[in-house]
Image: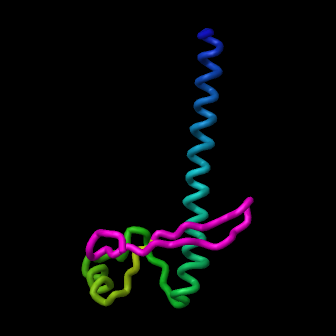
Amino acid sequence: MNTPESAAERGEAQGTYKEAHTQMGKSAEDFGEKTAEHHFIAERYPDFEKQHPLGPKSVEALERALEGDRIDYVAVKGEKNMGTYTGYQYRRFDISKGTLP
């Protein structure tokens, strides 16, 4: 039955669900970022320099990095089983072609 009370409860439940879903997505993103930094990058590039997410401050610096083959565009996904880290998967993108390998 659709009453003002049930409508209010439904609205509250939807808000709670949306908030929890948003937090879950943020947690998954943070997990992937930490996995990339502390596992994928640390294993392959021990002397890496962390950069601002938007890249170097000047267009020329980015072009030099691209020309010098010093940029990798990789999507890293941390794996877990029952809350325990169990490794990761990754996929490298060829940004010069704008396609997957």
x, y percentage for residue 67? Answer: 27, 87
- Horizontal and vertical percent position of residue 3: 61, 9
Residue at the location (56% across, 76% down)?
37
Q: Quadrant of residue 11?
A: top right
On the picture, is 68 further left or further right than 4? left
Residue range corresponding to the magenta coloring: 75-101
* Residue 42, above or below 7: below
Query: Residue 52 is drawn in which quadrant?
Result: bottom left
Give the total of numbered labels. 0
Q: Quadrant of the C terminus?
A: bottom left
- Which residue sits at x=61%, y=64%? 31
Front residue of 52 and 68: 68
User: Is residue 53 or residue 3 the one in the foreground?
Assistant: 3
**Colour mode?**
rainbow
Q: Looking at the magenta stretch, what is its main secondary structure?
A: strand
Would you say 13 lies left or right of 61 here?
right
89, above or below 49, in the image: above
Question: Considering only vertical position in the picture, is 89 above or below 11?
Answer: below
- The residue drawn where x is 48% and y is 84% is 49
Q: Residue furthest front?
A: 101
Q: Give coordinates of residue 78: x percent, y percent.
A: 60, 67
Q: x, y percentage for residue 46?
A: 55, 89
**Residue 5 figure quarter:** top right
For the N terminus, the image quarter is top right
Magenta stretch holds residue 84 = yes
Is residue 79 placed above or below 60 in the rendered structure? above
Asked whether residue 100 is drawn in magenta, I would say yes
